[in-house]
Amino acid sequence: MTIARDFVEWAWTLDQSTIPTGILDRTALHILDGLGTALAASRMNAAPFAVPTAASMGHADESSVIGSCRRFGAAGAALANGILIHSLDFDDTHPAGLVHATAVTLPAALAVAEREYASGADLLRAVLVGDELLGRISSAAPHGFHARGFHASSVCGVFASSLIASLLSGSSKDQAVNALGIAASQASGSMEFLATGVSTKQIHPGWASMAGVMSSALAVHGGSGPDTVFEGERGLYRLFSAVPADLAGITAGLGDSWQIADIEVKPYPACHLMHRNLDIAAQLHARLNPAEIDFVVVGVPPESIPIVAEPSHTKVAPRSAYEAKFSVQWSVAAMLLDGHIDVDSYRSDRISRPDIVELSSRVRINPVAGDGPAALQPGDVTIGLADGTLVRLRSDDPGSAETALSMHDMVIAKFRANVGAPEETTDALVSAVMGLTQASDLRALRAALTDVAEHWELVPVPPVTEYQS
């Protein structure tokens, strides 16, 4: 047996009744969060190319595009929705694998589930299984894909979306294995956007979702792919990873624990590698007068530095909103000055704010090696005040952490801020998602999404409001 065959065997025999209720509820919350980030992106026109590109692929009445009343073929809808969910970089992350999960898994699941008239429980199960594969194959080689210049969300995501599409379309086990093998030839995602400030990264989850849907279709119609796609001499890790992979861990203990439990909802629309330091900067803002800051030292794991701290001249003064989302210097400075980071913080007309750029120029980077994934390393910020006082705070210091909202409350608050529709309309969408386990079909979810889009057509689009994390 190979990894692909072992995983498909597990997924195809997974009994829904054996999945803990708490895991299904958590899956629904991640779906809700993904829909919210897509709706915010749609309102802000953050990816104006997403829907027109889907339209150019044909107008089959199969699947919904989030934030639009239009429907397209499943592959086109998966592309558009993946782009929309990820375009603000506000979507969830699996820190150990450093992948955006819902931006890849939900678009493929929603597109194929609608096309196949699946139930709400089918949709939940497919997303959960896709997240399981994505989390396991990405974290099997921590930071290995990024070290080679590849975006792990896209490179690994295509396998998850392929598995999802095969599961929901009723493929046989052999067809699902072939689809995974075919998906390997669609794996892609260059990190070169970091050097230029462009937003290519927005496209990556959408491409992975669409390519997974297409890989599954190719297998259904007779296409074949290697079942050694993960462990082979020319498989995923040999081609894309700079570090050896823990191949045995990919299928070890399937069903005993769940990767979705490790996926984190983002409180900030920025690279997850900066979040712990932004948490600390928020606490320091509440304790200090920003006008008294002389310099700032931010501890950053060495493997994160090429992504969020270098080259320093573009990180200090970002050339685009997307570049600012990957600048720990700029983002920490913004948090110290404003006390919050939200989608408006990274608007293109705000990234050149003189006060933020000036403080950003006084942020120094201190490489701090730690144990475990870089995204889970403690935040570490030192402030040098004008009077010579040094104030240092780490997120693992006793008393440094503030009381956080529960995941449920955080997702609901974030979702309401992102949607920007009347309470009744928003509540209907929340109810449709949280009631998926009992839904015999997706009509309520589809109707609720359409109601939001129709509301936007009737009233001016409101700004995305800040929520308290």
Image (cartoon, rainbow, N blue to C red):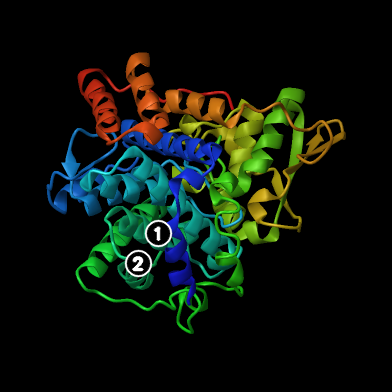
Instruction: Please rate how many residues cluster around mark 2, counting C-alpha atoms within 10 Å: few if below 14, some from 14 to 19, many from 20.
Output: some
Please tell me which residue lies in front, 382 or 78. 78
Answer left or right for 287 relative to 187: right
Say which label, 2 or 1, has the lower sequence index. 1
Labelled pair 2, 1 in contact (Cβ < 8 Å): yes
Badge 2 amino acid: Lys
Residue at 43% across, 58% down = 13
- Residue at numbered disc 1: 12
Give coordinates of residue 242: x percent, y percent.
Answer: 58, 73
The numbered mark at residue 173 is 2
Give coordinates of residue 59: x percent, y percent.
Answer: 12, 47
Answer left or right for 419 relative to 442: right
Indicate the quadrant where residue 75 lies: bottom left
The numbered mark at residue 205 is none
Indicate the quadrant where residue 285 lies: top right
Question: In the rendered view, would you say 361 is above or below 402?
Answer: below
Badge 1 amino acid: Trp
User: Is residue 40 visible to us here?
Assistant: no
Q: Describe the element under mark 2 as helix, strand or loop.
A: helix
Residue at 50% across, 43% down = 92
Give coordinates of residue 395: x percent, y percent.
Answer: 75, 39
Figure quadrant of the C terminus:
top right
User: Is residue 312 visible to us here?
Assistant: yes
Give coordinates of residue 402: x percent, y percent.
Answer: 72, 28
Instruction: Please rate how many residues cluster around mark 1, counting C-alpha atoms within 10 Å: few if below 14, some from 14 to 19, many from 20.
Output: some
Q: Describe the element under mark 1 as helix, strand or loop.
A: helix
